Image (spheres, coloured by chain):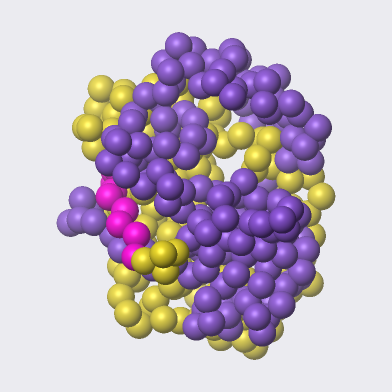
Chain colours: A purple, B yellow
Amino acid sequence: MSTKNITITPIGVVIAQNGSFVIEIFKKYRPALLGLDGFSHIQVFWWCDQLDNEECRSITLADKPYQKAPDKLGIFATRSPERPNPIALTAVPALHINHEEGIISVPYIDAENGSPVLDIKPYHPATERIKKVSVPGWCAHWPQWYEDSAEFDWQAEFVNA
Amino acid sequence: MSTKNITITPIGVVIAQNGSFVIEIFKKYRPALLGLDGFSHIQVFWWCDQLDNEECRSITLADKPYQKAPDKLGIFATRSPERPNPIALTAVPALHINHEEGIISVPYIDAENGSPVLDIKPYHPATERIKKVSVPGWCAHWPQWYEDSAEFDWQAEFVNA
């Protein structure tokens, strides 16, 4: 049973244009935003629809994706959008919510304009914020906190950037 | 285009029986685990297939789900499994990976036995661990760290537990 395909219906769309970033929630799902305002951050689950093709979804190994990574790295050891199910997850501050229009304003999101949104969850420290974390040597120099990542030169990390 | 249904193919299954919890990755996806071992924690994306029905997926409001919550709370302001797309996300330590058998051993996961697994990502502090977080008053007494949540009486929080 568990190998059966699953159907996801988008609940909204990422609108990323002219340096502005918002999540638009479709009308029927807008009541579900009630009470989200009190959270400083949300998790946006979105779909890399541009990579939703057989070729990208059959990739299991990445060729040295980062400067210090091994020559071959499994896709589940990366956050690459080229993966069997291209679900992307972005934690981001929710700056403002317009409930009537279904608009969540965010400072930035690493999604293409028009990307389907699958789910929105509140960021709870109790389930998401881990005190004692360790990572492999090849990314041990990456920032240890979300807030520090803005200052980091990510471009320099990617081998084929 | 973005309202088009999306097809997800399970990459594995949660096996939760006799107090043991593992993620079994299906054979064709096992190479994608290469290099995951160095991460202390992973994010498991799984599907609440038992709630994948029209009734549960049409719910947008929850009736006072927690002791101190408002009388009505939007589903996107909760991590309830009853939601339009019942994608669940669990951050968890990866205790051991058997690459040949495709088995990731975890200490615990809040999934029913047999739940389909959609994706595995490494937990990177740079993208997931937020220093300055705030939450609404009704859950401000919840633990502020993942590690502290094990000591917390979650059962007492749920209104209909």
* Residue A92 against residue B53 in the figure, above or below: above
Percent coordinates x, y for residue A116 in the rendering: 48, 60
- When asked about the image quadrant of residue B12, the answer is top left
Q: In this view, does A20 lie to the left or right of B158?
A: right
Query: Is residue A131 within the magenta segment?
Result: no
In the image as oriented, which residue stretches furthest toward the left? A1
Q: Is residue B61 left or right of residue B98?
A: right
Query: Is residue B8 within the magenta segment?
Result: yes
- When asked about the image quadrant of residue A123, the answer is bottom right
> Residue shown at 81%/50% (left/top)?
B132
Q: In which quarter of the image is the N terminus of chain B?
A: bottom left
* Residue B128 against residue B33 in the figure, above or below: below
Q: Give the range drawn in magenta.
A: B5-18
> Residue shown at 59%/13% (left/top)?
A68
> Residue shown at 42%/33% (left/top)?
A76
> Residue shown at 50%/83% (left/top)?
A28
Q: Tell me if I can see residue A49 in this picture.
A: yes
Report the front residue among B152 and A41.
A41
- When asked about the image quadrant of residue A103, the answer is bottom right
Q: Main secondary structure of the magenta part?
A: strand
